[in-house]
Amino acid sequence: MSILVVNAGSSSVKFAMFRLDDLMPTLTALLDWHGNSHQASLTLSRSDEGIRTFQIDAADYRAAVATSLKTIRQAMHDANKAEPEFRVVGHRLIHGGEELRRPVRIDSRMKETIAGFAELAPLHIPPGLEAIAASETALPGVPQVGVFDTAFFGEFPPEVFLYPLPYEWYRKWGIRRFGYHGISHQYCSQRAAEMLDGDSDETRIVICHLGQGASLTAVRGGVAVNNTMGFTPLEGLMMGTRSGTVDPGILLHVQREHRISVDELDDILHKQSGLLGLSGVSSDFRKVEAAAASGNSRAQHALLVYAHRVREQIGAYAVTLGGLDALVFTGGIGENSTRLRRDVCRGLECLGANLDNKRNEETRADGDIATADSCARILVIHTRENLLIARQARELVADID
Ligand code: ADP
């Protein structure tokens, strides 16, 4: 028996399969349109076989996902000489609004509820619903479960989720802070708890998820108490191409004085800011690091701003938590950039977090890079969002049985 995890985006769909009993990964697959609306490729990777690529007729998103699922089934059948059996399909869904704070079993009423969140996440919820419909067709009778990126943040108190804007905006339009990247943060919070001696209900952890998108979460005793992303994933840290938080007065100023339209501003804040906008080199952290190392001063500034914003937010969250037991680095940048971790940890000694420079250079995830006498541990954790989705989907169907 297997669990299938489906992560549907606007231009690609990722699949991951796990064994039901021990959650061992058995297969991953990527359906990618490569910007071409009619043809996509499906790349299958199996631990025991290597990589195979298939061309998929992709004019219709739902049909392309269904074809991919059939191809995955066939590949498993060929490998095991038996029809693969699926216990549950877990779908990653980026938004569960205010209502959905736990994984849910998806039925037709639930699909209507989820469709209501399309306004909040227009690039992710419609593909997610298409992928659910495709899975229902390709795997009839297999329970479908939705796991939400916002759910880990369902316990935010009013002082965290309310903006200092007219209260009617919240009441009438639902404008509030939600938080994002919750599946990664929840996985890392659980993994950090396993790695820490004496984890308790009061353990205070700050998790830095630093990838193409970036956010920090403050966690006390396994419960998230704040996240740097807000109503949208644009708030908070500087990212690859996203600005993160800036003075809202700037947005008014450039519209009034420089005639930048709302659509242009949308594009600039999402796609032309962050590392790319400041450095002028790339949104890719490695390339910005390489440019900085060869003397490019804009790239050097971009890295300084990036680290400064992470460090500043760690300080704020340590205050929220009343101290710090562990700092976690995850995501492509957090897991791999020794320079970034060094820059961020500079000055954190005042919070009891002391980086061991040698361990920082040598440790691979999952590991501890703090000095032996550091009061707070500094952990590097390889995030495994699919595993958390598989775990939660398995728990939900076990509860239903
Ligand atoms: P996504 O948010 O798309 O999942 P990732 O978590 O894979 O992205 O992170 C991508 C980022 O990680 C890129 O900016 C990339 O340059 C950076 N990265 C990956 N490996 C390294 C490395 N060895 N050193 C520095 N940055 C790295």
Image: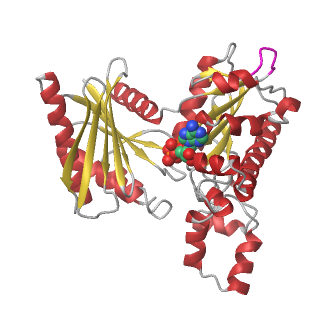
Q: Quick one: which residue is furthest to the right in this view? A: 350
Q: Is residue 311 inside the magenta stretch?
A: no
Q: Is residue 336 left or right of residue 246?
A: left
What's drawn in magenta, residue-wise? 370-375
Q: In this view, does 204 lie to the left or right of 46?
A: right
Q: Is residue 66 left or right of residue 129?
A: left
Q: Nearer the viewer, residue 293 or 380?
A: 293
Q: Residue at x 62, y 21 (%)?
A: 367
Q: Nearer the viewer, residue 167 or 289?
A: 289
Q: Which of 17 and 155 is in front in this view?
A: 17
Q: Is residue 377 left or right of residue 272?
A: right
Q: Residue at x 63, y 47 (%)?
A: 290
In this rendering, is residue 127 above or below 210? below
In this rendering, is residue 262 above or below 140? below
* Ligand 1 sits in quadrant: top right
Q: Quick one: which residue is furthest to the front in this view? A: 294
Of helix, strand and loop, which mostly describes the magenta segment?
A: loop
In this rendering, is residue 227 above or below 79? below
How many discs appear? 0
Q: Position of residue 241 (x, y in %)?
A: 59, 59
Q: Where is residue 36 in the image (x, y as percent from the top left)?
A: 30, 63
Task: Examine the rendering and report whether any part of residue 18 can be seen.
Answer: yes
Task: Give the quadrant of residue 352.
Answer: top right
Q: Quadrant of the C terminus?
A: top left
Q: Residue at x 16, y 25 (%)?
A: 79
Q: Residue at x 28, y 42 (%)?
A: 43
Task: Give the quadrant of residue 104.
Answer: top left
Q: Where is residue 186 in the image (x, y as percent from the top left)?
A: 56, 34
Task: Examine the rendering and report whether any part of residue 139 can be seen.
Answer: no
Q: Position of residue 342 (x, y in %)?
A: 74, 34
